Image (cartoon, grey):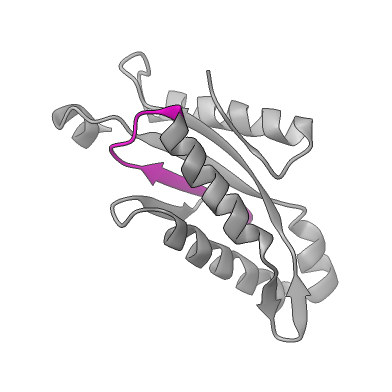
Amino acid sequence: MARANRQDQTFALLIVDLDHFKPINDTYGHQTGDAVPKEVAKRMTESVRINDAVTRFGGDEFVIVLEDISTESQIELVCRKILDELASPILVGEHKLTIGASIGGAIFTEEIEGTAELLKKADAALYQVKEAGRNAFRLAS
């Protein structure tokens, strides 16, 4: 956020939650469960630009920071690309797994006072996606 302010850039923060990930761990074991997020991270990293950041935030959650991006249409393109990449089955050993994702996002603006508020907005958008049926994205208004 400090760099964005210094360089007069806008950025977006996305929270990506893997849909129905727990059953994969429960059904196929933790070794398979550990391999899936690694492949998901790889696919998401390939879906964003080199200056953007993809980080695992928890067991089945990731945070993506899209630098120097300011329009909803730009963010929408990235989200669609991520969802398309994740729609292809993941091959782990003998298992061919299909996983979806829900994405909530927020654009950093002057009105947002800190990282916590930005995360809160993105998380609220993520919650709306999950309530509406998952495997989609939404930006905070």
Q: Is residue 71 above or below residue 113?
A: below
Residues drawn in magenta? 58-72
Does residue 99 appear to the left or right of 82 in the view shown? right
Q: Residue at x 54, y 23 (%)?
A: 140
**Relative side of 16 to 132, left or right:** left
For this rendering, which residue is in front, 103 or 113?
103
Residue 11 position in % (x across, y down): 34, 34
Q: Residue 87 placed where, x, y %? A: 67, 59
For the point 14% across and 30% down, the residue is 6
**Relative image position of residue 54 (x, y in whole percent):** 43, 54
Q: Is residue 75 magenta?
A: no
Q: Is residue 61 visible?
A: no
Residue 117 is left or right of residue 60, and the answer is left
Q: Quadrant of residue 33?
A: bottom right
Q: Dividing the picture into quarters, in which one does residue 22 lie?
A: bottom right
In this figure, what is the number of numbered marks? 0
Q: Residue furthest top?
A: 111
Is residue 94 visible in the rendered image? The answer is yes
